[in-house]
Amino acid sequence: MDESASSSRAKPPRRRKSAGGKLDPRLVLHPVHLRILTAVQRRPLTTAQLAAEFPTIAQATLYRHISRLVAGGALIVSDERWVHGARERTYTVPPQGAYISREKLSRLPKREIIGFFNQFLTLLSDGFARHVESPAKGKLHPNQVRFFVENLHLTEAERAGLLDDIRNLIERAARLPAGPGRQRQTLAHVSFPSP
């Protein structure tokens, strides 16, 4: 065994430089990759925790997807330690986030962009179905789920200001620590100019 294994802590992991907006859209928007990135966006997770998060994905398959995300700069190793003689890594998104630049997205064929959007909707639909069908939930309370569409008339500056306000509210809520009485919530946001 490696000498460093004698300690419960491995050497600090080397930080891979984030590609930021240079990320490959096909890497980020892959349906499994989207699920992984969504899971670690606000809380770093170990490989074991990710495996528990996605029990329907074979472990070997999940690890391959994690490796691709790390190689592509969409995930980074935030911590590394030895647990029972095995190396355990904790993953999170880069400080700049795992986002795609508008320029890169605009270069994709339109049908491919629509396909990625449908994958995003499927991700939401699967999560909603798990919530509704969970035996532990019992009867669905009307205050637990909300979905609506609102049509607004905005200039580009007004739209940008609204999105900044929404982002600031989400960032403030995201800083609240997990604890008694707090349940993890899924908040999805989609905006586009109506034809």
Image: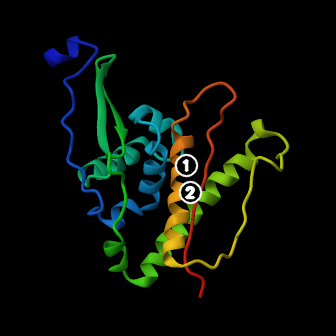
Q: In the picture, residue 111 is in which quadrant?
A: bottom left
**Rendering coords of residue 139 (x, y %):** 85, 43
Identify the image quadrant of the N terminus.
Answer: top left
Per the image, label 2 sits on a secondary structure element best described as helix
Q: Which residue is mark 2?
A: 166
Q: Residue at x 42, y 63 (%)?
A: 29
Q: Which mark is residue 72?
A: none
- Seen from the viewer's position, the closer of residues 62 and 153 is 153
Q: In the picture, residue 162 is in which quadrant?
A: bottom right
Q: Residue at x 54, y 30 (%)?
A: 177
Horizontally, is 158 left or right of 18 in the view? right
Horizontally, is 37 left or right of 85 in the view? right
As shown in the figure, which amino acid type bears the numbered disc 1?
A: Ile
Does the CB distance between marks 2 and 1 fall below 8 Å? yes
**Rendering coords of residue 108 (x, y %):** 35, 79
Residue 33 vertical placement versus 41 (above, below): below
Q: Which residue is mark 1?
A: 170
As shown in the figure, which amino acid type bears the numbered disc 2?
A: Ile
- Seen from the viewer's position, the closer of residues 173 and 60 is 173
Identify the image quadrant of the C terminus.
Answer: bottom right
Residue 194 vertical placement versus 95 (above, below): below
Q: Residue at x 63, y 44 (%)?
A: 185
Outermost residue toward the top in this view? 6
Residue 66 vertical placement versus 2 (above, below): below
Per the image, label 1 sits on a secondary structure element best described as helix
Q: Residue at x 82, y 46 (%)?
A: 140
